[in-house]
Image (cartoon, rainbow, N blue to C red):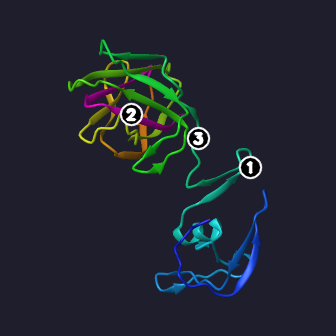
Amino acid sequence: MLGLACATLLTGGVAYAASNTVKLEVNYGIKLIQNGIDKTPTGSAKPFIANGNTYVPLSVVSDLVGIKTTWDSNNKSVIIGEKSEGKPLGTPDFLDSHLSSNKASLSSNESMVINGKSYGSLGFKIYSTYYYGSAVDYIKLNYALNNQYSELKLSLGIDDNKELRKSGMLRNISFKNENGDVLKQVSLGGGSVQENIAVNLTGVQKLVIEITGDGYGVIDFINPTIK
């Protein structure tokens, strides 16, 4: 459902949710205009207003913006765009940090929020807690892949963790193979995010994710998936 601010209430009606039934006092008669053309659906797909929001079936929005949506009945989820294939990358076989004190730490499946936007909890966080103003020499995450995978997909961002977020921080995240060859490199500043990153893993025996940079903060590894 798509929520849009709307000031005008038109003819009334009542709608019900399919499960965990909730009664809504709704107002029909809303039009959908796309590039000057009336694209208002008819029948049961009619948009309506309830509690100050405009509700439109996701299938209608999908057609209007040209983005595929599918229903995943096993996980009771709506998939917007292409479905992510593969399996979770998981936590590393080995976490290495150059720091002798305040070493980096990792936590899995915690809420990830970047610039106020939720990115769910699939993935893990790297806490870089070096408080003394010096650069973080490196943090390394090591994965034994044994040439079994072709691609890693994920998103990366600096979390809105208030205690460990520093606006001037900079992180460079490099994805390397066992020979130290850089497969992909991403740079992040405080509060930034890069989505839909793809790393080619063809022929990679060991994946090393190396994090370098200044300041301290929390890096979100969002839904990392290998196939």
When the figure is inspected, residue 176 is found, relative to residue 152, above or below; the finding is above
When the figure is inspected, residue 154 is found, relative to residue 13, above or below; the finding is above
**Contact flag, marks 1 and 2 (Cβ < 8 Å):** no
Spatial CA distance of label 2 from label 3 is 26 Å
What amino acid does circle 1 point to? Ser
- Eye-nearest disc, 2 or 3: 2
Identity of the residue drawn at 70% across and 82% down: 42
Identity of the residue drawn at 65% across and 56% down: 70
Residue 205 in the magenta stretch? The answer is: yes
Q: Main secondary structure of the magenta part?
A: strand
Under circle 1, the secondary element is loop
- Can you name the residue that lies furthest to the left here? 134
Residue 178 lies, in percent from the top left, at 37, 18
N-term-proximal mark, 2 vs 3? 3
Identity of the residue drawn at 65% across and 80% down: 41
The image quadrant that residue 129 belongs to is: top left
Residue 38 in the magenta stretch? The answer is: no
Residue 13 visible in the current orientation:
yes
N-term-proximal mark, 1 vs 2? 1
Residue closest to the eye, 108 or 116: 116
Disc number for residue 85: 3
Magenta-highlighted residues: 204-227
Q: Which residue is mark 1?
A: 73
Residue closest to the eye, 72 or 122: 122
Could you tell me which quadrant the N terminus lies in? bottom right
Q: Which residue is mark 2?
A: 218
Residue 43 visible in the current orientation:
no
